[in-house]
Image (tube, grey):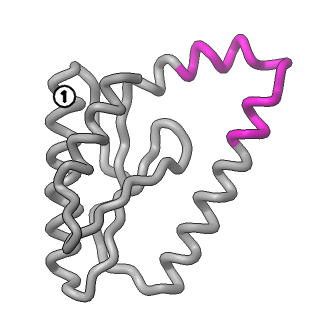
């Protein structure tokens, strides 16, 4: 868990006032890096740099880093859809956490998932 936090911090260290990177949790171990800029290419480059920093940190901790989607420019509508998806997954995770019947089985899976870092 600490290795993941350290890796995400490494990515966020590249954020500036001009390039306000954000990293959001979708559902462990899936995260999204985003930035809102008018200069589209600069935004994509910033996300790629953050991904590289996170990947380096994860791999130094003997973890794996997988990219689900390459950085891309999205419209406001796509951004809203992503936000809704993140909120739904958060609600799903809260419901899953409250499920006492399978808690023991899930704890083993959670430990394995925490060692893997995935980026979108």
Q: Secondary structure at mark 1?
A: helix
Q: Residue at x 36, y 59 (%)?
A: 22
Q: Position of residue 105 (x, y in %)?
A: 69, 14
Q: Please indicate whether residue 105 sits to the left or right of residue 35 in the image.
A: right
Span colored in magenta: 93-110
107 part of magenta stretch: yes
| In the rendered image, the vertical position of residue 60 relative to residue 68, given as above or below | above
Q: Residue at x 79, y 39 (%)?
A: 95
Quadrant occupied by the N terminus: top left
Q: Position of residue 17 (x, y in %)?
A: 22, 69
What residue occupies the far front of the structure in this picture? 17
Residue with the mark numbered 1: 59
| In the rendered image, the vertical position of residue 22 relative to residue 26, given as above or below | below
| In the rendered image, the vertical position of residue 105 relative to residue 21, given as above or below | above
Q: Please indicate whether residue 85 sits to the left or right of residue 113 in the image.
A: right
45 part of magenta stretch: no
Q: Residue at x 39, y 80 (%)?
A: 74
Q: Residue at x 58, y 74 (%)?
A: 81
| Prevailing SS of the magenta stretch | helix
Q: Position of residue 31 (x, y in %)?
A: 42, 48
**Which one is in front, 12 or 81?**
12
Local crowd at mark 1 within 10 Å, few (<14), some, or many (≥20)? some
């Amino acid at each position: 868990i600490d290795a993941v936090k350290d890796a995400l911090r490494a990515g966020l260290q590249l954020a500036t006032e001009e390039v306000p990177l954000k990293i959001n949790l979708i559902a462990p171990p899936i995260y999204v890096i985003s930035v809102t800029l008018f200069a589209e290419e600069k935004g994509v480059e910033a996300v790629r740099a953050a991904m590289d920093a996170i990947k380096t940190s994860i791999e130094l901790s003997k973890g794996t880093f997988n990219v689900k989607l390459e950085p891309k420019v999205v419209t406001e509508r796509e951004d809203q859809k992503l936000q809704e998806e993140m909120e739904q997954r958060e609600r799903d995770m809260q419901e899953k956490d409250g499920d006492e019947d399978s808690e023991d089985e899930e704890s083993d899976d959670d430990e394995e998932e925490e060692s893997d870092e995935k980026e979108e």
